[in-house]
Amino acid sequence: MAVLAGLNMQVCLKELNTDWQMRIGIATAPSVIGLFGSKRKSYSCIGDTANLSSRLENICDPGGVFIDEETYSDVMLYILAAQVNNFAGQRSSDEAVEKKIKRLEAELANNPDDINNLNALGNAYFEMQAASAAIDCYQKVLKLDPDNTKAKVGFADANLKREEFEKIAIKGKKDRMSVYRVIGLIDNSLNRSKIPEVFYDKYSEISPKINIPDEVILPIESIDGRIGHGKMVASIAYAMADVMELSLEEKENLLIAAYLHDIGNAIIPSELLDNNRKLTPTEYEVFKKHPP
């Protein structure tokens, strides 16, 4: 919910079209939160976690959201994020290397077993200080050619530099940390294990017909980690209505109803939504308040 709030805060600030810019840092760990003070009380959050989020905010790009590794591990199934390297993207030579990477990736798409291109791509990633991506390229080469000297050397160098390149020195922290830049929400419709390509090709344009702001459903879906569930159910319901040859009005009504089918969760306590045990009779009565 914090990451979603951060993303929406940046979107709203951008829409205001002001000269202001904002940086957001989010960290996850136990914290001390509440009213502090004896005479003049103020609501605050203190401790290592608050300090870490402040440090992340300090190093964040204006307009961005930076999160720590603990937060990323909690949201990685729903949030698209990129690991922040120490210097990548800040040097004048990076633009040329990025173009080279795109060219090599395009060439490899046509010939994924080209050892020379894989080595070259690994070298380019290493130059951009993306050590993990470089290691992946070298491993592919060594799988094809276990005695490839260039890949062996590149693999060793990337492993040695991985922490230096991909972990950030944070003030107040002894060890370097992995930091991630939040990009946006993962589109579940692109998951081919859930949505076949033939279905996507036919019904991918259905979701934009839902003229309800995402902010209505996203907070509810975030409680129990079902980001994108409403749109997924809505698209499938629309497709079923299409196969049944219902009218356009009926299909569009069903689309909205399916999208909002979990809105009643807003009145269900979060501790009841996010558990796997059997409900007590009292808890079951609470769930019965969920609108059908």
Image (spheres, helix red, strand yellow):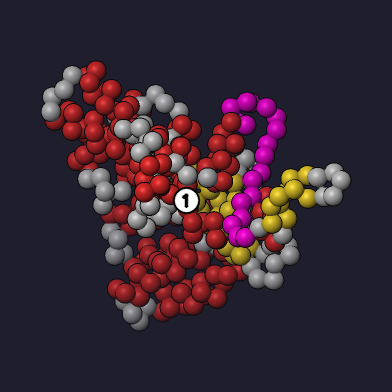
Q: Is residue 255 left or right of residue 168?
A: left
Please tell me which residue lies in front, 163 or 94.
163
As displayed, is residue 53 above or below residue 136? above
Q: Position of residue 166 (x, y in %)?
A: 57, 64
Q: Residue at x 29, y 38 (%)?
A: 233
- Name the residue carrying label 1: 271
Q: Is residue 69 left or right of residue 291?
A: right
As displayed, is residue 32 above or below residue 213? below
The extreme right residue here reads 39
Q: Residue at x 25, y 45 (%)?
A: 195
Q: Position of residue 207 (x, y in %)?
A: 33, 31
Q: Residue at x 26, y 26 (%)?
A: 254
The extreme left residue here reads 244
As displayed, is residue 216 above or below residue 57? above
Q: Secondary structure at mark 1?
A: helix
Q: Position of residue 100 (x, y in %)?
A: 46, 54
Please tell me which residue lies in front, 217 or 113.
217
Evaluate whether residue 94 shows in this view: no
Q: Amino acid at mark 1?
A: Glu
- Main SS class of the magenta portion in the image: loop
Q: Residue at x 58, y 53 (%)?
A: 67
Counting other residues with Cα less than 10 Å from the Cα at mark 1, is it few (<14), some (14-19), or many (20 or more)? few
Q: Is residue 286 left or right of residue 31?
A: left
The extreme front residue here reads 281
What are the residue bounds of the magenta stretch?
A: 13-30
> In the image, is residue 133 part of the stretch drawn in magenta?
no
Q: Is residue 231 left or right of residue 159?
A: left
